[in-house]
Amino acid sequence: MEEEIGLLTETLKRGTQDVDRQLSEMSKLFSIVVIEPPKGVIYMTTSDFPKTWGVLRGYFGDNFGTYELKGIPKEKIDEVIEENRYYSYSTKHMLMIPLPKNDFFPEGSYLGLTKDISYLKNIKYTINLMLLVVLCLLTGVQILLVNYAMDKVLGALRELNEFTGGLYKEEVFDLSQRFTKRYGSREVDKLIVTLNKLIENVEINIEKMEEFSSNVSHELKTPIASMKSMIEIELVQERSAKDYEETLLKILEEINWLDGMIKELLNLTQNPQSLKRLFKPVDLAHMGNDICDIMEMIAMESGIDLSWNFDDIKDIRVIGDAGSLKQVIMNLINNSIKYNRENGWIRVRGETFENTVKIVVEDCGIGIKKENIARITDRFFREDNVRTHKKSGVGLGLAIVKHILEVHKGYLEISSELGKGSTFKICLPIDREEEKKRS
């Protein structure tokens, strides 16, 4: 509408004869009204637009200025003129524009264009109705989908509840069962997988606990039975003071062995969180040198040559408990001394690989069978052909090493060849934050 009025306004300014043609074209699209305040309204709708102002006045005669434009009161038209704005009334939409000075209409006249917009109401009603129908359909579909999903989930939960209830029968857990059904729902099936893994982990841990309890009972039973037998023998008949002394020394040896096992068991059962509270930056090179200074004398007593070099890790720090890490290194060196050959050797060194620092303990000892390497860190595991009750301890040393390293987010690498020796690598994450502070 504005575009047509702008074009007409420019034409009026130029005073060309195109005014008739433009008004005629516009009258096909709009109802056209020319207003001369305060005289009133001149109404024009015909495509054969009158040529002159005089013809218009002659056409309307005495009614000139009193005509109301198709239901739009004259005062409303005056209001539009005064405020120079659009006006919507009933099913009409009108725009009033002041006309420039021209040869066709009196000075101060306004050109008004009105258009019937009743069809827009029908369109609006149709659109609103369609939106309402679509909204109702979407709501209904959503309700159906939610009900379907809820029924599926609740059905799955009911079956899972029945399954978990069946794991405990007659005061006994049967953890060999697994829930195998799948429902095609990603979240529900993921829950089932997690539940099965949880049951499997619980089953494995219970088996380990039962095995551990059995091993502890066996290890305690052997020295206690030995001490009981020695005491009973001594009580059968009177013996010399020297015999009693020898028996008491043997009993003391058994007691010391029991004491050592209890301490190792306490290390294994220590809460990792309580250990983590002791964590701080640890200088492994400094610690390694101190430990090797002490262990060198023990190695010499067994005829073993111990050498070490920590130059490659002298500026490296790890986060951990210094006491626990010291126990790890000492356990590995002590094992290498214990299971070495006569006049053997042990080499201890530090090295790094990417974000990991490693303490390597290498020996030329008796080695470990290939099939036993994976089990060597299990609790109470001992190789029967090379380890005896008195020499090997209770089989908790490497289990403790593994436990401590796991708490420190580290691990133990083991390689060995039977009859040629073994290599143990303590692997720990490097503390890069501490390294940045020092640099």
Image: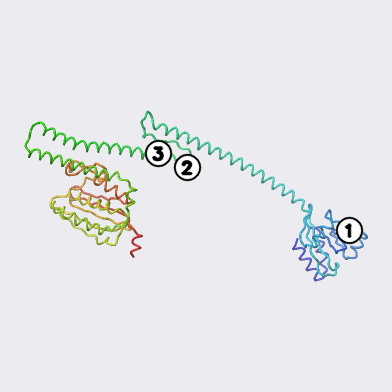
Q: Is residue 162 above or below residue 101?
A: above
Give SS at disc 3: helix
Q: Residue 214, percent across and down? A: 26, 36
The residue sitting at 66% across, 46% down in the picture is 131
| Front in this rendered view, residue 299 or 71 | 299
Residues 51 and 164: in front is 164
Q: Measuring from the top left, give residue 323's x and y in whole percent.
A: 27, 52
Choose mark 1 or mark 2, whichever is in front.
1
Which residue matches tag 3?
196
Determine whether the residue tagged by mark 1 lies in a helix, strand or loop: loop
Say whether disc 1 or disc 3 marks the residue closer to the N-terminus.
Answer: 1
Choose the circle earlier in sequence order: 1 or 2.
1
Which quarter of the picture shows residue 255? top left
> x%, y% of residue 201?
36, 40
Compared across the picture, whether 310 is left or right of 299 comes to: right
Query: Residue 260's spot in the image, x, y percent?
Result: 21, 44
In the foreground, 439 or 60: 439
Q: Mark 2 points at which residue?
A: 187
Tell me the quarter of the image containing the C terminus.
bottom left
Q: Residue furthest top?
A: 170
Residue at left offset 26%, top offset 48%: 401
Which amino acid is tagged 3? Asn
Judged left or right of residue 16, residue 368 is: left
Of residues 110 and 115, which is closer to you in this image? Answer: 110
Indicate left or right for 191 with 390 as reference. right
Helix, strand or loop at label 2? It is helix
Asked if 83 appears above or below 338 in the picture, the reply is below
Q: Which residue is drawn at 25% across and 38% down?
A: 216
How many numbered tags mark residues here? 3
Residue carrying label 1: 66
